[in-house]
Image (tube, helix red, strand yellow):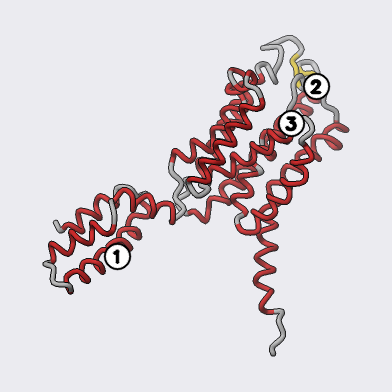
Amino acid sequence: MSAIDEYLNQFEATIPRHLRTEARAEVHSHLEELAREHQRQGFTRFEAELKAIREFGAPRKIGQAWRRAAGVVDWPDILLASLPTLGITGLGWALVGQHLPLWFYLTIFGLGAGMAWWRSWPTWWYAWLGWLFLAVLVVPDTPWIFLVTFPALVTLLAIDSWQYATLMTLPFTTYLAFAQLIERQQLVTTGWGPGNIYPGNNVWLETAFSILWIVILAASLRAARPTRRGLYLLAGLLGTQLIYLGGVVLMLLLAKGLPTYFITTITTRQILFSKLPVGLITVGLTLYPLLVWLVARWVRQRGPQSRLPA
């Protein structure tokens, strides 16, 4: 086995299976070109290969650079993207999060910004950025910062990457929708069973949705083709929001259809004029980055065509 082949085998081990053929061919081409150049300078084939490998760099380092260029998101980045969801919702909030001061969250997200800048703004940072804006929204006397900067930033980011902008809106299209659409004591039983269908234990249902969001994040960020990530994320978020709305309607139907067993505080008027509008707003916010990106692309494509010939 030649030195280049051995190098390529080590490099290949750092690349996802579905990208290995393409990655190996690209690196092999570069190494061959370097080796031939050294052979023309008078080195033997063996010496030329060793010199080319030393100049090219360590296989693991080149593999990391290639994955980043190809848009591959590694599991550590997915874990970092999921950390706010784990800490601010469900069991994480009940056991730890609610006992921490707000400045702690702002500090953590600030440190996250520093790490993201140092790592050239990896994908996970955009999800963190959304949670940072959520923290700013709940701080007294600072909601105006959110109202001024968040819509503008989402729009500017969506022009170039609607996937990143969608990640940034994640807290507002999931957790806030959940908190507004499904509330405590909306559906209770009349005496049988646990006495409270939802939330017999609110934290468990919220934790279940948190896990669902993390699965959606992981599935979209680890998509075999990076071009499909946004579609997976969009489909997952819209599906989750439909579950929210379906849960609210189901509560009303159970109470109306089985009044002997269920009691609900939800009314048809509340669904039509409160719950449904909130649900539509979250769906609209989920679709907004994609619509901005489509409009921007249409404008870019129309621009040169609209110019008159000289």
Q: Secondary structure at mark 2?
A: strand
Relative image position of residue 265 (x, y in whole percent): 82, 22
Residue found at the far top of this picture: 191
> For mark 3, what is the residue?
138
Q: Quadrant of the C terminus?
A: bottom right
Relative image position of residue 18 (x, y in whole percent): 38, 53
Residue type marked 1 = His
| Residue at 65%, 65% in the rendered image | 297
Task: Examine the rendering and report whether any part of residue 77 can be seen.
Answer: yes
Q: Are marks 3 and 2 in contact (CB under 8 Å)?
A: no
| Residue at 66%, 43% in the rendered image | 169
Residue type marked 2 = Thr
Q: Of the residues under marks 3 and 1, which one precedes in the sequence?
A: 1
Q: Are marks 2 and 1 in contact (CB under 8 Å)?
A: no
State the residue in front, 9 or 153: 153
State the residue in front, 260 or 3: 3
Please tell me whether residue 292 is drawn above or below residue 37 in the rendered image: above
Residue type marked 3 = Val
Q: Mark on residue 264?
A: 2
Q: Residues within 10 Å of mark 3 (few under 14, many from 20)?
A: few
> For mark 1, what is the residue?
30
Please tell me whether residue 122 is drawn above or below residue 267 in the rendered image: below
Count of residue discs: 3
